Amino acid sequence: MTQEVCQPPTAANTRPDPERKGRPSTDAKERILDAAERLFADHGFDATSLRMITAQAGVNLAAVNYHFQSKDALIKAVFARRIGQVNQERLRMLDECETAAGTGPLHLECVLRAFAEPVLRAGRKRGGTQAPFARLLGRMYTEPAETVREVLFEQMREIAARFGAAFHRALPGVPQVELLWRINFCVGVLAHSLAGTALLQFLSDGQCGPTDVEGMIARIVTFLGAGLRAPVVSPASRG
C-alpha cells in the first residue's frame, strides 16, 4: 500500500497539540481512530483518504501527523487497538482450558470457544448490533494490502503458535497438514460470520441475525468442532 503522507504543518495548523477548542490530545487521537475504523470498514483501506478521516473526526491533517505520521501507521494503530485486546482475552481463555486439562488432552470445544468467542463478541456493540470492527476484520482477509498483511502477521504470530499447539493437543489423531487446512477453514468461518451478517439476514428473511450473539457463538463452536473432528480422507482416494 502506498503511504499517504500527511501535509506539512502550515501557519494555520502548527500548534504542538493540533486539536481544536483546547480538547485533550488523547481525545483527538481516539476520535481519529474511531473515525478511521468506521471509514475503513465502510469503504476499504485504499478508498479511504486521510481527508475523509479528518473530516469525520473533526480534526485537521496536522493532528493525524502529530499522532500517526502516515496512513499506514494509522491502519496499524486501528487494528492494534482492537486485536490486541481480543488476543489477550483469547490467550486468557486458552490458559484456563490448559489449566483445566492438566496433563490430559485439551477439550476441543473449550479451545474453540477461546479461539472464537472473543472475536465474535468484539464484533458486536452493546445489544448485539454489528460494530464497525466486525466489517473491518472481514476486510482484513478480503483486502490483503501489504500493510494489512503486516498487521495480520504481527498480531497473529503468538495466537497462531499457541492455538496451533492447542488444536494439535486436542486432536492428536489429525495429521499436521490436515489440521492446518482445517484451522484455516475455521478462520474463514469467523471472518465470514463477522462480515456477512447482512447476507444472513437477507437469506433468512430476518430470522437469523447478529443480535443473537450467544446463539451464534454456540452454533459456530458446534459447527467448527464437527469439521475439525471429521474423518481424514485422502484427496487421491475421492472419486
Image: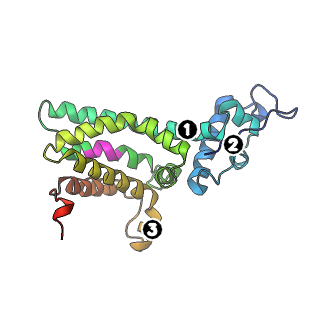
Pointer 2: what residue? 4
Which kind of residue does numbered mark 2 sit on? Answer: Glu
Q: Secondary structure at mark 3?
A: helix
Distance of mark 3 from mark 1, alpha carbons?
A: 28 Å
Are circles 1 and 2 on residues that touch, CB within 8 Å? no
Query: Which one is nearer the viewer's eye here, 118 or 104?
Result: 104
Residue 110 found in image quarter: top left
Q: What is the residue that sits farthest to the top in this orientation? A: 16
Q: What is the total number of numbered labels drawn onto the structure image?
A: 3
Distance of mark 1 from mark 2, alpha carbons?
A: 14 Å
Q: Earlier in the sequence, mark 1 or mark 2?
A: 2
Whether residue 201 sits left or right of residue 26 in the image: it is: left
For label 3, the crowd category at 10 Å Cα-Cα, with few meaning under 14, some 14 to 19 and many 20 or more, is: some
Give the percent coordinates (x, y) of residue 30: 61, 37
Q: Nearer the viewer, mark 3 or mark 1?
A: 1
Report the span colored magenta: 112-117
Query: Which one is nearer the viewer's eye here, 28 or 192?
Result: 192
Residue 15 found in image quarter: top right
Q: Earlier in the sequence, mark 3 or mark 1?
A: 1
Pointer 1: what residue? 76
Q: Secondary structure at mark 2?
A: loop
Magenta highlight on residue 114:
yes
Distance of mark 3 from mark 2, alpha carbons?
A: 33 Å
Which kind of residue does numbered mark 1 sit on? Answer: Lys
